[in-house]
Image: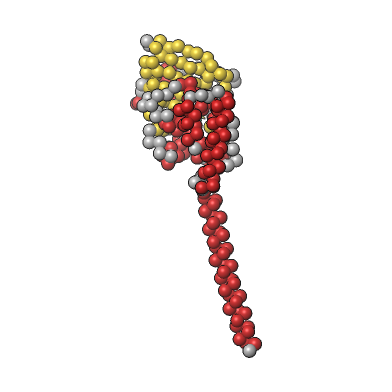
Amino acid sequence: MNVKKNMKTICRIRSISWVMIVLILLLFFIYCGNQAGKLNGNNGLERQDMVKERLKMVEVLRAYGISDARVLAAMEKVKRHVYIPLGYRWKSDPYGDHPCFIGYNQTISQPYIVAYMTEKIGLKPGEKVLEIGTGSGYQAAILAELGGQVFSVEIIEELAQHAREVLKEEGYGNVKVLTGNGYNGWPEYAPYDIVIVTCAPEKVPQNLVDQLKENGRMILPVGTNSQRLVILRKKNGKVKIEEDLSVTFVPMVQN
Ligand code: SAH
């Protein structure tokens, strides 16, 4: 009788243990799935969060005076967070009103500056754009979203490679990234309708002016300690320069 009772108890303990093991495994898999989703930005909940964050960001841009509907739509659509390398992504509040670190002492510009430069340069679908300073690839994605054929040059190989991968994953086949020194431009695909520089040289690089089409326009920060956004237009072979906002960009390094 006692033996029977003992056997019953052992069986019960065994089945409870199995249920526990299955439960623990289940919880473990759910946790792993969640973490992977968080990291990739692909989890359903996470995605909803990011959509809301982007809407908030666009409201801030509107309040700052960005009014071009196409630019606002691109800012709402492009997933800024996926361009920030994983190690920096969740520490950085990717949709906040500030620049974010992307590693190698570099930053992705504040959303307002990205939107402002994009609006100012008035990109039309199909135009050829040379970007200097690919960084995370975010600005390139915004230009591509607006229908530009984007040629982007980045001096840091690791950043160029990261941007290539993300831009491909996000479906921007109309962006090419070159690892190289932006002072040389990208002569192979010149001339360009637009040149946009997202690092600051001390003065306007002549090679970039030379690679601009007739009726082309260029926007870039110029200066060392105190920088100004400069807008340059080429008309009848002549260059017209207009100074704009005062800004702070990382320097455009010589090599
Ligand atoms: N447009 C980027 C932000 C750029 S940060 C984005 O959307 O994320 C400025 C970038 O310019 C950095 O990645 C830096 O490495 C790059 N850079 C600096 N000097 C350069 C040069 N001479 N040629 C090409 N890239 C340069």
Closer-to-camera residue (199/46): 46
Q: Residue at x 54, y 35 (%)?
A: 55
Please state the horizontal and vertical placement of residue 10, each as a whole percent of the image.
60, 79
Please state the horizontal and vertical placement of residue 84, each as a whole percent of the image.
52, 38
Q: In this view, does 89 lie above or below 129?
A: below
Q: Is residue 79 left or right of residue 211?
A: right
Asked whether residue 34 is in view, the answer is yes
Q: Is residue 8 left or right of residue 180?
A: right
Look at the image and tell me in which quarter the N terminus lies.
bottom right
Q: Residue at x 37, y 10 (%)?
A: 236
Q: Residue furthest bottom?
A: 1
Closer-to-camera residue (151/47): 47
Q: Which residue is drawn at 53% across and 24% down?
A: 66
Q: Is residue 143 above or below residue 225?
A: below
Please state the horizontal and vertical placement of residue 120, each as a whole percent of the image.
48, 21
Quarter residue 112 falls in? top right
Q: Which residue is drawn at 59% across and 71% down?
A: 17
Q: Is residue 240 above or below residue 80?
A: above
Q: Which residue lies furthest to the right in this view?
A: 2
Asked whether residue 155 is in view, the answer is no
Please state the horizontal and vertical placement of residue 54, each as a whole percent of the image.
54, 36
